Image: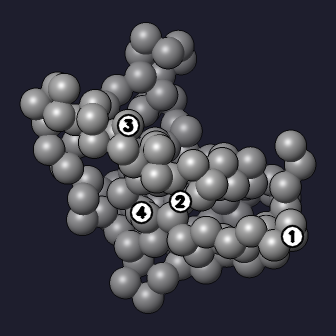
Amino acid sequence: MAVWPTEIRLSADKRSLAVSFEDGQSFSIPAELLRVNSPSAEVQGHAPSQRITVAGKQNVRITAVEPVGSYAVRLVFDDGHDSGLYTWTILYETGRDQEALFAAYVAELKAKGLSR
């Protein structure tokens, strides 16, 4: 799926990223969801079995949105995490599927005895 953003805007409180796409879809994606599902190797590992559950990020904020070429942005979070490259497809799919992704995240935390 080739999707292109028409606007990427960090909210004033830095707790969400608003992204609009050329197909007319617009999403407001919580910083917490972007942080805990970071596409970085630090979170995703190098294989599915290496993926970690990131807890305690309910109040995380995005401090910077940095362009990476013409295909992605690097998000810098106030907890120091900055190694994930969020491609346009990742942002689109995260926005589109955010309810299901967030529900799965909360269930994973609960199963592991962790908190947001």
Which of the two labelled residues, at mark 4 and mark 3, occupies the earlier sequence position? 4
Amino acid tagged 4: Ala
Helix, strand or loop at mark 4: helix
Q: Are marks 4 and 3 in contact (CB under 8 Å)?
A: no
Helix, strand or loop at mark 1: loop
| C-alpha gap between disc 2 and disc 4 | 9 Å
Which of the two labelled residues, at mark 2 and mark 3, occupies the earlier sequence position? 2
Residue under numbered circle 4: 31
Q: Residues within 10 Å of mark 2 (few under 14, many from 20)?
A: many
| C-alpha gap between disc 2 and disc 3 | 22 Å
Residue situated in front as seen by the camera: 82 or 7:
7
User: Which picture quadrant has residue 107?
Assistant: top left
Which of the two labelled residues, at mark 1 and mark 2, occupies the earlier sequence position? 1
Point out which mark residue 104 bears. Answer: 3
Helix, strand or loop at mark 3: helix
Amino acid tagged 2: Leu
Residue under numbered circle 2: 75
Point out the frontmost of discs 1 and 4.
1
Point out which mark residue 50 bears. Answer: none
| C-alpha gap between disc 1 and disc 2 | 21 Å
Q: Is residue 91 left or right of residue 81?
A: right
Q: Residues within 10 Å of mark 1 (few under 14, many from 20)?
A: few
* Residue 104 to residue 93: above or below: above
Residue under numbered circle 1: 22
Q: Position of residue 75 (x, y in %)?
A: 53, 59
Q: Are marks 2 and 4 in contact (CB under 8 Å)?
A: no
Q: Position of residue 80 (x, y in %)?
A: 34, 55
Amino acid tagged 3: Ala
| C-alpha gap between disc 1 and disc 4 | 22 Å
User: Which picture quadrant has residue 19?
Assistant: bottom right
User: Which picture quadrant has residue 110?
Assistant: top left
